[in-house]
Amino acid sequence: DDSDNPDLDPKQFYNIAHRGASGDTPELTMAAFDRAVEKGADYIEVDLQMTKDGVIVLMHDETVNRTTDGTGLVSELTLAEIKQLDAGSWFNEAFPEKAQPEYIGLEVPTLREVIEEYSDELRLYIEIKEPNAFPDLEEKLVFLLNDTGLIGEDVPPGNVLIQSFGAQSLYNIYLLQPDIPLIQLISYSDIPSITGDAMDSINEYAVGIGLSYTQITRSFMKEALSRDLLVHPYTVNKPEHMETLIEWGATGIITNYPGVLQEVIERN
Ligand code: G3P
Ligand code: CA
């Protein structure tokens, strides 16, 4: 990698909590991030959407329908409207065996709130979810990361990673601020056809690859690792799958259960 893009330590294995500890708590809420800290996660994986009034908030879907008591597109609601929503009760209804009274009334967090609350304890693994829906998202994101001191001249790289399926979106970030480590996500259908040359082009701007663990092979892993690319499979929830991926050399795993992964790491 001869770019300005810094490598993260390939010998360091990362426990990455997918939407926070989303197996046990309502995804992308402060409860999910508290649990991730408790269970020993190194990073929290977060998905970004933007409100009607241009604020970056954490939500996986384009609409608030699944994970709140409201309806509609995030992009058609103001932050004030989104802050009225309950982002925890749906979880209690969907998973009665995991329900907790303190989940009722949890808010949808803004990215700034999460950075302010957790940047001493956790690192951020940010996904640009809808690369085409919000043309100014990359610029706003890079501004926010600088403004909160998460990136910058005297800050060691790795406090924040940015991932996307959209190569153009990652490239835009690279042009704005070349020292942010980037992870190229590869979709299911592209994995079987990815060549060494394709890996070399990814290596020009990114430090690693993210892909579904169901599609990964030992030889894919070997090819990527031989180029010093990080390999972060998602979303791995079973100990036996975690063990195989670690044996193959995965440099991190994205999981809904950071506590389960932590136990596997300690056994290995
Ligand atoms: O880390 C990649 C993974 O989060 C992509 O899947 O749908 O959970 O955002 P999704
Ligand atoms: Ca994601």
Image (cartoon, rainbow, N blue to C red):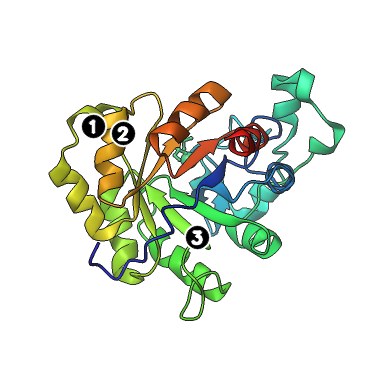
Q: Name which quarter of the figure residue 122 lies in.
A: bottom right
Mark 2 or mark 3, which is nearer the start of the sequence? 3
Mark 3 Cα shell of 10 Å, populated few (<14), some (14-19), many (≥20): many
Depth check, front residue: 168 or 24 = 24
- Disc 1 marks a residue whose amino acid type is Asp
* Lateral position of residue 248 relative to residue 34, left or right: left
Please tell me whether mark 2 sits on a helix, a strand or a loop: loop
**Residue denoted by label 3:** 160
Quadrant of the rendering where the N terminus is positioned? bottom left
Q: Kindly report the distance in space between the C-alpha atoms of the residues bearing marks 3 and 1.
A: 26 Å
Query: Residue shown at 19%/36% (left/top)?
Result: 194
Q: Measured from the top left, where is residue 231 in percent x and y?
A: 38, 43
Q: 166 or 76, which lies in front?
A: 166
* Left or right, residue 234 beside residue 207: right
**Residue type highlighted by circle 3:** Val
x and y percentages locating residue 232 in the rendered image: 42, 41
Instruction: Report which residue position mark 2 lands on.
Output: 187
- As drawn, which residue projects farthest toward the bottom? 153
Asked whether, in this view, residue 2 is left or right of residue 217, the answer is: left
What residue do we see at 74% from left, 21% from top? Answer: 93
Q: Determine the secondary structure under disc 3.
A: strand
The residue at the far front in this view is 268
Q: What kind of residue is marked 2? A: Ser
Query: Where is residue 210 drawn, in percent x and y?
Result: 38, 41
Residue 190 numbered tag:
1
Q: Nearer the viewer, residue 79 or 200?
A: 200
Q: Say if residue 104 shows up in the picture.
A: no
Q: Are marks 1 and 2 in contact (CB under 8 Å)?
A: yes
